[in-house]
Image: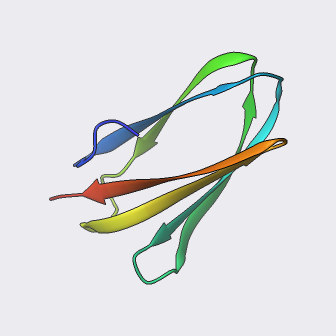
């Protein structure tokens, strides 16, 4: 996740060994789901830009799941 802290946008950068779907669930610091997205990842590096301009300031967690792995990253939004 870059940048973090972020203001208006952030970029998710990740690599996968095999093509397939990656499920993203973004939750706020209260554990409430803010958004869910599915992305069709290609082998190698993948980039996703997220527009944060409508999101309130706070701490969020981005959970990503792909066959064979899962990861969680923290995102801080400042306004």
What's the residue at 41%, 40% (across, down)? 1
Q: Is residue 14 above or below residue 8?
A: above
Q: Residue furthest left?
A: 79
- Residue 35, located in which quarter of the rendered image? bottom right
| Residue in the foreground of this view, choosing between 66 and 52 | 66
Residue at horizontal 35%, vertical 51%? Answer: 52
Q: Quadrant of the C terminus?
A: bottom left
Q: How many marks?
A: 0
Colour option used: rainbow
- What residue is drawn where x is 52% and y is 80%? 32
Q: Position of residue 26 (x, y in %)?
A: 53, 62
Where's residue 57, x and y in %?
A: 24, 66
Q: Residue at x 82, y 41 (%)?
A: 68
Would residue 41 appear left or right of 4 to someone viewing this image?
right
Answer with left or right where residue 12 lies relative to residue 35.
left
Q: Residue furthest front?
A: 68
Task: Pinpoint residue 72: horizontal percent, then vertical percent.
Answer: 54, 54
Q: Residue furthest bottom?
A: 30
* Above or below for 27 versus 39: below
* Lateral position of residue 56 relative to residue 41, left or right: left
Give the answer, above or below, for where 56 lies relative to 71: below
Query: Residue 19: horizontal and vertical position, in percent?
Result: 83, 24
């Amino acid at each position: 996740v870059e940048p973090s802290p972020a203001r208006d946008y952030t970029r998710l950068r990740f690599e996968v060994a095999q093509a397939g779907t990656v499920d993203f669930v973004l939750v706020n610091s209260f554990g409430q789901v803010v958004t869910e997205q599915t992305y069709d990842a290609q082998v190698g590096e993948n980039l996703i830009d997220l527009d944060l301009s409508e999101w309130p300031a706070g701490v969020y967690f981005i959970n990503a799941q792909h066959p064979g792995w899962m990861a969680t990253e923290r995102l801080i939004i400042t306004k």
